[in-house]
Image (cartoon, coloured by chain):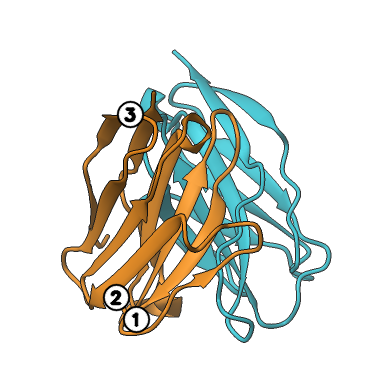
């Protein structure tokens, strides 16, 4: 299947700092990418949908000023957690939709584990 | 959104077949049935999807009931590496084609 990468795989930061997570589709161009968050022993929750060249669409309850999303190219989307706090500690997973595959299959990155101290 | 119901957990013995059920009684005509699995500390991995007919690929088989109100993911020979949370998800191609995750089934494979 198609490959989606994320960087970094894990990050530890101090409270109040900002953290940027990169998501790349390696072998296809993704007009649409998604960002999910997963807390321990819970399922994935969609945070936002990112469309190349336009503003992201955020799910209800997700602060767009806190979770900045940029999708500047067809293979790269970034999520910046601004002024991170301990409650933002979570597993962040990106996903990219392959427009050339059957039913536009969505492929997921390996995730980024964020720990805010 | 059409929802799915899956058992919270299942156990299997290594090298035996596993049948993971999913109920989706409110499925609409434009919903595709997708299965993903998530291994510990990893992102979800696409497994298989279908609309009406049964589907086979190198990872698994998907059996879809004639009325489409349920489906079963079949792993023909479970290995220890198949231990994961399996998610059955409906995607409506006419309503944004979104993937919304439920609780999934945690599959445990015993050696």
Residue at 79 percent of width and 71 percent of height: B67
Q: Is residue A91 depicted above or below B80 in this figure?
A: below
The disc numbered 1 marks a residue on which chain?
Answer: A
Disc 2 and disc 3 in contact, CB within 8 angstroms: no
The residue identified by callout 1 is: A99
Tell me if I can see residue B36 in this picture: yes
Choose the circle earlier in sequence order: 1 or 2.
2
Residue at 57 percent of width and 66 percent of height: B54
The location of residue B103, given as percent across then percent down, is 66, 42
Comparing labels 2 and 3, the label whose residue is closer to the camera: 3
Q: Please tell me the colour of chain A.
A: orange
Label 1 SS: loop
The answer for how far apart the CA atoms under marks 2 and 3 are is 32 Å
> Does residue B18 appear left or right of residue A86 in this picture?
right
Give the residue furthest to the top: B111
Disc 1 and disc 2 in contact, CB within 8 angstroms: yes
Residue at 56 percent of width and 35 percent of height: B18
Q: Quadrant of the N terminus of chain B?
A: bottom right
The disc placed on residue A14 is 3
Q: Please tell me the colour of chain B.
A: cyan
The disc numbered 3 marks a residue on which chain?
Answer: A
Choose the circle earlier in sequence order: 2 or 3.
3
The residue identified by callout 2 is: A30
Label 2 SS: loop
The location of residue B70, given as percent across then percent down, is 74, 58
Residue at 59 percent of width and 42 percent of height: A43
Q: Is residue A29 depicted above or below B21 in this figure?
A: below
- Closer to us: B12 or B30: B30
- Closer to us: B33 or B72: B33
């Amino acid at each position: 299947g198609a490959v989606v990468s994320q960087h970094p795989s894990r990050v530890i930061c101090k409270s109040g700092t900002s953290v940027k997570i990169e998501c790349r589709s390696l072998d296809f161009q993704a007009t649409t990418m998604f960002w999910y968050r997963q807390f321990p022993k819970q399922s994935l929750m969609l945070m936002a949908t990112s469309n190349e060249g336009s503003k992201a669409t955020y799910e209800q309850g997700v602060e767009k000023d806190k979770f900045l999303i940029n999708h500047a190219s067809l293979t790269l989307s970034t999520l910046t957690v601004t002024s991170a706090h301990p409650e933002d500690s979570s597993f962040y997973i990106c996903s990219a939709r392959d427009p050339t595959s059957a039913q536009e299959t969505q492929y997921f990155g390996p995730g980024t584990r964020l720990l805010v101290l | 959104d059409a929802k799915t119901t899956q058992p919270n957990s299942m156990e299997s013995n290594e090298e035996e077949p596993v049948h993971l059920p999913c109920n989706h009684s409110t499925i609409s005509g434009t919903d595709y049935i997708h299965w993903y699995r998530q291994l510990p500390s990893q992102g979800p991995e696409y497994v298989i999807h279908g609309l009406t007919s049964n589907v086979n690929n190198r990872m698994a088989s998907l059996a879809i009931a004639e009325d489409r109100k349920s489906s079963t993911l079949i792993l023909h020979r479970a290995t220890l590496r198949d231990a994961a949370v399996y998610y059955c998800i409906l995607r409506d191609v006419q309503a944004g084609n979104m993937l919304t995750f439920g609780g999934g089934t945690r599959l445990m494979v015993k050696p």
